[in-house]
Image: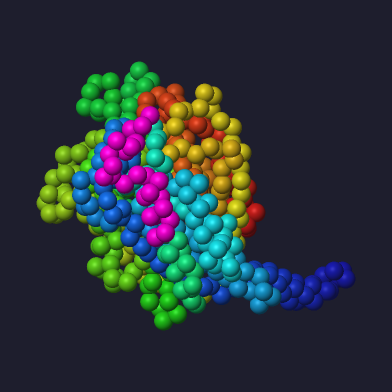
Amino acid sequence: MSLALCNLPQIVLLAALLIPATFLAAEAAARGGEAPLLAGWASVDITPPRSVALVGQLHRRISTAVRDPLTATALALETRHEDGRREQAIMVSCDVIGSPIAIQRRLQERAAASLPDFTAAKLFMNATHTHTAPGFIDSTFKGRYDTHDLPDVMKPSKYAEFFLDRVAGAVEKAWNGRQPAAMSWAMGQAVVGFNRRASYFDGTSVMYGKTAVEGFSHVEGYEDHSVDILLLWSPQGRLSGLVINLACPSQETEHLNEISADFWHDLRQELRRRHGEELFVLPQCAPAGDLSPHLIYRKQAEAEMDRRRGLSRRQEIARRIANAVDDVLPAAQSAVKDRLIFRHTIARVDLPEHEPPAPPFYETDSVRPIEMHVLRLGDVAMATNPFELYVDYATRIEARSPAVLTMLVQLASGSSGYLPTVRAVAGGGYSADKFVVGPAGGQVLVEQTLRHIQELW
């Protein structure tokens, strides 16, 4: 018998001892990146106190009433390691059409002045993209939102000051109120956002185009019905708040002449009815540049189902999302962690601009460079972009991401207009005919987002 065969039991024994040790070392290294989580919440009413110009349609609308309040919600997160290392973020979600980078910078400046133990650059905003809220800039899009001739109407710049005062207070409250917390994540499903571009046999596409015609071929793009959720828990096991990431802008009642948060207001009400009035809800609009809550076919059947349930369309949307939350809640409760790996990168990325670039629409930022926030929260990646980003780009990122769950947030840290796909540009039509960054820049955005996510893993 050979020496090798004679020593086989010892070799097997040695391997049996070494392999678990290797795994234990890897486990220890991984846990070395974990730290106790602190979290703080705050929300504030950002409804303007006077009549305003509502931004989002292609004509001037002056608000005549408040249908429901606009809300800003802040979530402060921090981990502290035994060696003194810290990681931080403050997310701020607002019921407005966009988050101009200038407004975020001013909010960061206020945070720097009032919160000396917070790195102000790690604050970022996102918008729900409601079309029934004011803007921040006095004269945009050929004066269609200008109110210089209406002295009783609150100017956007005045609303900006009001907004910053309110939101800075919420940021301070969230940060100063952070306490030991736990987090879990879940993914559900709710049919809310629909592709809004009808394509025809002649190769053209039209947003909200007619489908009951012989020339109609297909709906142009993909739809994303996932509901990605971060759940925050108190040390006593109470659900304190939800980050809900959904691929649909807040535009079910977008044509109103009333101030409104749209369906997010109905959802907040429904979730608090089910889970307590103290529950915080932080909305995030996932990439949805070619989606909206409006159907382009099956309209009658959907309307009849709403009627039978006795619900408005907004209430039906809220019911679907709340049901998605309740469906995953038991699974989320089984995976709660009070220690996690938390990392936060701020990247500035140059993207090639389309030539000629689109004229400014509602409050379009320069995109050279864009600011991107990329976070790791345990198994979850989160990455922002400032565009109304077509869903295909999100699919490319999520399909290649190393994270178990990847939450992408559009209209964050800027408002840089639509970013359409190659097939959308070929079809033309609104949202694919005028843009600052086109498909070439979109693919750079995909690759850069993935690079920064991968670095956190």
Display coloring: rainbow
Q: Nearer the viewer, residue 202 or 158?
A: 158
Q: Position of residue 263 (x, y in %)?
A: 27, 52
Residue 71 appears in the rendering: yes
Stretch of the chain drawn in magenta: 142-166
Q: How many marks?
A: 0
Residue 289 in sight: no
Q: Residue furthest top?
A: 202
Residue at 38%, 29% (x, y): give it. Answer: 142
Quarter location, residue 23? bottom right
Residue 457 in the image: x percent, y percent? 63, 58
Farthest bottom residue? 236
The N terminus appears in which quarter of the rendering? bottom right
Instruction: Measuring from the top left, give residue 427's x and y in whole percent.
Output: 40, 24
Residue 297 against residue 170 in the figure, above or below? above
The residue positioned 33% from the left and 23% from the top of the image is 200
Residue depicted at x 36% and y 22% = 204
Residue 133, percent across and down? 32, 47
- In the displayed structure, does residue 154 sit left or right of residue 356? left
The relative height of residue 424 versus residue 87 in the rendered view (above or below) is above
Foreground residue among 330 and 98: 98
In this rendered view, identify the residue nearer to me: 125 or 338: 125
Left or right of 176: which side holds 333?
Answer: left
- Please identify the residue farthest to the front as the structure is shown: 151
Above or below, 418 against 340 in this view is above
Which residue is rendered at x = 27% and y = 39% of the image?
Answer: 150
Q: Is residue 368 left or right of residue 160?
A: right
Q: Looking at this view, is 6 or 441 the one in front?
A: 441
Q: Is residue 159 magenta?
A: yes
Query: Relative to 425, does residue 111 appear above or below in the rendering?
Result: below
